[in-house]
Image: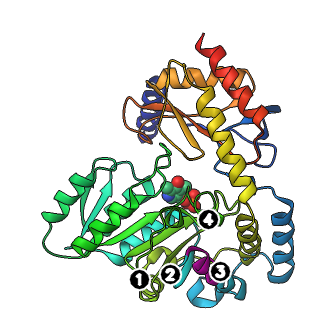
Amino acid sequence: MPFEALQKELDQRTALGLLRQRRTLQSPQSPHIVVDGKSYLSFCSNDYLGLANHPRLVSALQQGAAQYGVGAGAAHLVSGHTHVHQQLELELAVFVGKPAALLFSTGYMANLGVVQALVGKGDSVFADKLNHASLNDAMQMSRASVKRYRHNDIAQLALLLEQTVSGRKLIISDAVFSMDGDLAPLPELLALCEQHDAWLLIDDAHGFGVLGDQGRGTLAHFNIASPRIIYMATLGKAAGVFGAFVAAKQVVIDTLINHANSYVYTTATPPALSSALLESLRLITQGEEQRAHLQQLIARLRSGLRGLPWRLMPSTTPIQPVLVGDNQSALKLSAGLQERGIWVAAIRPPTVPQGTARLRITLSAAHSVTDVTRLIETLHELAR
Ligand SMILES: *Cc1c(COP(=O)(O)O)cnc(C)c1O
């Protein structure tokens, strides 16, 4: 039976320390979560501003459901596009400084849709080797020719662009790298786009709400703008809800509405999510204090983790990975923390390159300085 082959593959993964398993939460997302009846101090959500369980979002969602019901009932192009989806798109576009925006169900689907709608056979996609898996899948599906450059290696990217003579060109990069926490050099990427008449697709899943004035994202952080930039961000991380959007020139948005399969052939998200997201945008805009607190926590963590046997990777964002190396050691460290009531996920290949298994610590404005101090002290204890 072919099932035996499946089991064998899973057994091999287990032997390599690569088996993935889920744990079940019995509490809302927050720094303090309950898993299998035990409480943990958690450092692994992407809820950077602590909005996922914010009372104003809960209430906006309830009000949205009372007004629009639960299901959208159809795709956006049929009868699923409601007033509140439309309102959210308008506000998102203004918030990130783009002429238009389009909601997608998830970030994964947004990336598939954009790349597939903009490039195809005969075109070229240039992608950072550490881009998110959804971007990698998107370029494979687009059938464009794929050219991957070393992480943030502008010189190599320039060379690849020079060697490409025909077809459309699309450069793709995470703005904040999801497993490393460092930033892409967006001004340099944009300059190359201008030089080579290319588009720049930026995935700001981890910058939106966190970086830039009023949390407007990584473009605001770098103070750059260009019609060449196609901006994508997710709404299930700092925004605390669910979904994603793409913001760009109107002609790009119209192209997506007509050609992005992951937009056209799927049911619209529940309208009440958009009600919650409108409230989330207000909280993000007013969240200067939360973002300042987050910066304080980052500084505290980085200074506190000096002198550990594992290398703290260079990052100025709430993603603060501790590089361990081999899979079993990373799992062991994560398990040691867990025994002491702290939850940090061990990230292993293929999510990260071979030999770079790590603890991916993520900080949230909902953490206290005491929470971070406890993590620092526990890691020092485990190092001894
Ligand atoms: C989380 C993430 C996505 C996927 O977004 P979802 O809304 O969770 O599907 C895409 N890109 C990056 C960089 C991410 O971190």
Q: Is mark 2 within 8 Å of ligand 1?
A: no
Task: Decide: is 58 above or below 182.
Answer: below
Viewer-proximal residue among 319 and 64: 319
Task: Decide: is 13 above or below 280.
Answer: above
Badge 4 or badge 3: first in the primary sequence: 3
Q: Position of residue 231 (x, y in %)?
A: 47, 71
Mark 1 and mark 2: span between their CA atoms?
7 Å
Mark 2 and mark 4: span between their CA atoms?
33 Å
**Contact (Cβ within 8 Å) of mark 1 with mark 2:** yes
According to the image, label 3 marks what residue? Answer: 91
**Which three-letter amino acid code belongs to the residue tagged 1?**
His
Residue 213 numbered tag: 4
What is the secondary structure assignment of the residue under circle 1?
helix
What is the secondary structure assignment of the residue under circle 3?
helix
Q: Which callout, 4 or 1, points to the residue nearer the camera?
A: 4
What is the secondary structure assignment of the residue under circle 4?
helix
Q: Which residues are magenta?
A: 88-96
100 relative position to 369: left or right: left
According to the image, label 1 marks what residue? Answer: 259
Mark 4 and mark 3: span between their CA atoms?
16 Å
Mark 3 and mark 2: span between their CA atoms?
22 Å
Badge 4 or badge 1: first in the primary sequence: 4
Residue 128 in sight: yes
What is the secondary structure assignment of the residue under circle 2?
helix
**Which three-letter amino acid code belongs to the residue tagged 4?**
Asp
Q: Which callout, 1 or 3, points to the residue nearer the camera?
A: 3
Mark 1 and mark 3: span between their CA atoms?
23 Å
Q: Which callout, 4 or 3, points to the residue nearer the camera?
A: 4
